[in-house]
């Protein structure tokens, strides 16, 4: 691809600008002319939504697998114990599990937002 074929666009991060000036200074000058303020750019490009979506899908799949395993265990326990006592303890366990999942989700979201603010 010749120099004249490269689409000029602004830099997306300070790290990208440093790399381009170090490796391709002539192209970097062109990019810089299309960038309002390199100093105002984030240090690194923000993560793409697809990365977060992939993480979320992976988490949901793990949660679904855990739910299926728990359901199998529940069915087994139901046949081994009295149904009434088991249902009460099962409800309490599900409530605890739900609370753990909610705390984990809140922690993950806080970590994601904290990381996004730093960048």
Image (cartoon, rainbow, N blue to C red):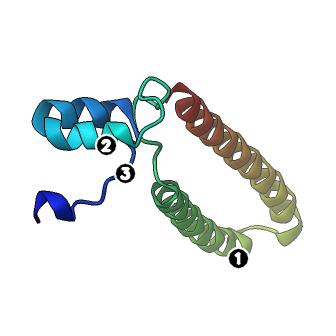
Decide: is 21 above or below 97.
above
Q: Are marks 1 and 2 in contact (CB under 8 Å)?
A: no
- Residue 45 percent across, percent down from the top left: 42, 41
Mark 3, Cα crowd under 10 Å, few <14 / some 14-19 / many 20+, is few
| Side of 49 relative to 76 (left or right) | left
Q: Which corner quadrant of the image does residue 17 belong to?
A: top left
- Image point (53%, 61%), residue name: 53
Q: Which residue is mark 2?
A: 31
Mark positioned earlier in the residue sequence (3 or 1): 3
Q: Which corner quadrant of the image does residue 63 belong to?
A: bottom right
Decide: is 30 above or below 95.
above
Q: Helix, strand or loop at disc 1?
A: helix
Q: Are marks 2 and 3 in contact (CB under 8 Å)?
A: yes
Decide: is 99 above or below 23.
below
Q: Which residue is mark 3?
A: 9
- Image point (52%, 56%), residue name: 49
Which numbered disc covers residue 79?
Answer: 1
- Residue 33 percent across, percent down from the top left: 35, 38
**What is the spatial separation of the Cα atoms under label 3 and label 1, in whole angstroms?**
66 Å
Q: Where the N terminus falls, by quadrant?
A: bottom left
- Residue 57 percent across, percent down from the top left: 53, 64
- Image point (69%, 40%), residue name: 106
**What is the spatial separation of the Cα atoms under label 1 and label 2, in whole angstroms?**
69 Å
> Is 37 in front, or is 84?
37
> Is 70 in front, or is 33?
33
């Amino acid at each position: 691809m010749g120099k004249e074929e490269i689409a000029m666009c602004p830099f997306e991060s300070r790290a990208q600008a440093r790399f381009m000036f170090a490796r391709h200074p002539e192209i970097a000058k062109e990019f810089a002319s299309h960038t309002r303020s390199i100093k105002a750019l984030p240090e690194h490009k923000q993560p793409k939504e697809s990365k977060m979506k992939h993480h979320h899908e992976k988490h949901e799949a793990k949660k679904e697998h855990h739910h299926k395993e728990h359901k199998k265990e529940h069915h087994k326990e139901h046949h081994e114990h009295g149904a009434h006592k088991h249902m009460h303890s099962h409800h309490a366990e599900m409530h605890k599990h739900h609370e753990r999942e909610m705390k984990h989700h809140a922690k993950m979201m806080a970590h994601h937002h904290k990381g996004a603010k730093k960048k």
